[in-house]
Image: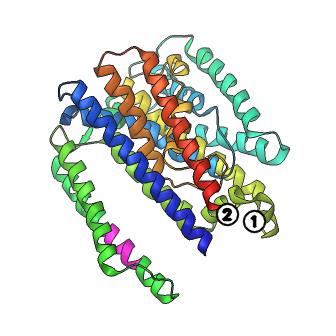
């Protein structure tokens, strides 16, 4: 029990550190851009840009928690996007059918990658590196190096539309009420098993902080046009996969595999099956990100191969608290990491700095996050 407490504490400290980094970045960019960075329009665009990276980061979190890695995520996202563009632009398929094909294709790709890793023993690095090259070529083969466009309006909805402000407030209230229910259920469960250490006052303060953050976020987004649909999709993904990772047998098995794969086998966990499912879910989320990415661009393009999106997803997961050694990490942390990554891109672009500075700063923050993880692990031993 003591080890779990330490792990939770370390993660909280790391999360707080990353939040402080985000605040420092926002203050610096606001000062450097004459206040333009902190405008509601820019913050809305920033969070919308972070959505598809955050969704990919959620899948990457599960992969890294198992002790694996996926270097093909960005190429899978781009390849699936090109296939969906071909389905709708060239073959005239309706939006529902187009998206369904893309989601199934992403899941199948992940299933194949996971199967190779789990059942052949080939290292995740090699399997996903090979897949990265395959799907990089696949994008060029499908598009011929050209942009396949335009999409139907119903497809573009998923990347460009907004929730009406009134519904934004309704969603905020539902989120706050749901969080209160979750906190009370947690408290009852801990009390039942005599493991309750937190006072009611501490729980209420934490809940009020959550509510304040949600309401401020909705106010900012509503001050522009409303909650962007990609952000709403990202929030739904986070809620679902947080539940899956924390409240299901499968989720607990994923953490057990990453913590100690031999012990997981001795405990009766079907390691091969669970690893395959993790990569299948990761492929599915890459396809979800592909829908948002192509809908926002209004086209499928092989230029996605130049985006290094898989590296952004890995960085988002690690910066958000996922340990590269496996067994530690939370789905919601990937969203924090994605916002940090997109803040760097957005802020430095507004400052008209050369692109290489974005890579340098991202690299430094990523190395700092990994260093922090290794140091806290040493202290915990």
Which region is colored magenta?
Answer: 177-185
Of 155 and 186, nearer the camera is: 186
How many numbered discs sit on the rendered protein?
Answer: 2
Drawn side of residue 329 relative to residue 126, left or right: left
The one nearer the camera, 195 or 3, is 3
The quarter of the rendered structure image containing the N terminus is bottom right
In the image, residue 173 sits, relative to residue 28, either above or below, namely: below
300 vs 254: above or below: above
- Residue at image location 76% in from the left, 64% down from the top: 264
Which numbered disc, 2 or 1, marks the residue that appears first in the sequence? 2
Residue under pointer 1: 269
How would you rate the neighbour count of disc 2 (Cα within 10 Å): few for under 14, some for 14-19, many for 20 or more? Answer: many
Q: Nearer the viewer, residue 181 or 370?
A: 370
* Quadrant where the C terminus is found in the figure: bottom right
Give the residue displayed 47% in from the left and 30% down from the top: 362
What residue does disc 2 label? Answer: 253
CA gap, disc 2 to disc 1? Answer: 7 Å
Residue at (62% x, 69% y) in the render: 3
Residue at screen point 38% across, 23% down: 298
Local SS, label 1: loop
């Amino acid at each position: 029990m003591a080890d779990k407490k330490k792990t939770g504490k370390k993660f909280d400290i790391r999360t707080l550190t990353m939040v402080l980094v985000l605040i420092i970045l926002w203050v610096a960019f606001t000062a450097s851009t004459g206040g333009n960075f902190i405008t509601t329009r820019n913050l809305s665009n920033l969070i919308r840009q972070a959505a598809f990276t955050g969704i990919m980061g959620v899948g990457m979190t599960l992969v890294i928690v198992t002790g694996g890695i996926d270097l093909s995520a960005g190429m899978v996202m781009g390849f699936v996007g090109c296939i969906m563009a071909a389905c709708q632009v060239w073959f005239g398929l309706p939006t529902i059918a187009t998206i369904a094909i893309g989601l199934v294709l992403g899941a199948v790709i992940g299933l194949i990658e996971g199967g190779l890793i789990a059942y052949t023993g080939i290292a995740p690095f090699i399997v996903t590196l090979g897949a990265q090259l395959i799907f990089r070529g696949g994008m060029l083969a499908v598009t011929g190096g050209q942009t396949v466009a335009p999409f139907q309006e119903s497809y573009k909805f998923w990347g460009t539309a907004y929730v009406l402000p009134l519904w934004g407030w309704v969603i905020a209230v539902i989120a706050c009420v749901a969080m209160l229910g979750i906190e009370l259920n947690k408290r009852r469960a801990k009390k039942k098993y005599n493991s309750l250490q937190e006072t009611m006052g501490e729980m209420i303060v934490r809940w009020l902080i959550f509510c304040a953050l949600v309401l401020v976020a909705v106010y900012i987004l509503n001050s522009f046009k409303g909650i962007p649909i990609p952000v709403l999709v990202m929030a739904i993904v986070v809620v679902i996969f947080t539940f899956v990772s924390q409240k299901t047998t499968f989720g607990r098995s994923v953490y057990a595999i990453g913590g100690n794969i031999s012990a997981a086998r001795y405990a009766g966990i079907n390691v091969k099956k669970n690893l395959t499912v993790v990569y299948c879910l990761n492929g599915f989320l890459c396809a979800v990100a592909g829908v948002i990415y192509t809908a926002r661009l209004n086209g499928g393009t092989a230029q996605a191969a130049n985006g290094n999106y898989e590296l952004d997803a890995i960085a988002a997961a690690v910066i958000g608290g996922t340990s590269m050694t496996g067994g530690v990490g939370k789905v919601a942390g990937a969203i924090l990491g994605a916002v940090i990554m997109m803040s760097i891109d957005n802020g430095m672009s507004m400052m008209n700095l050369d692109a290489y500075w974005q890579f340098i700063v991202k690299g430094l923050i990523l190395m700092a996050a990994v260093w922090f993880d290794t140091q806290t692990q040493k202290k915990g031993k």
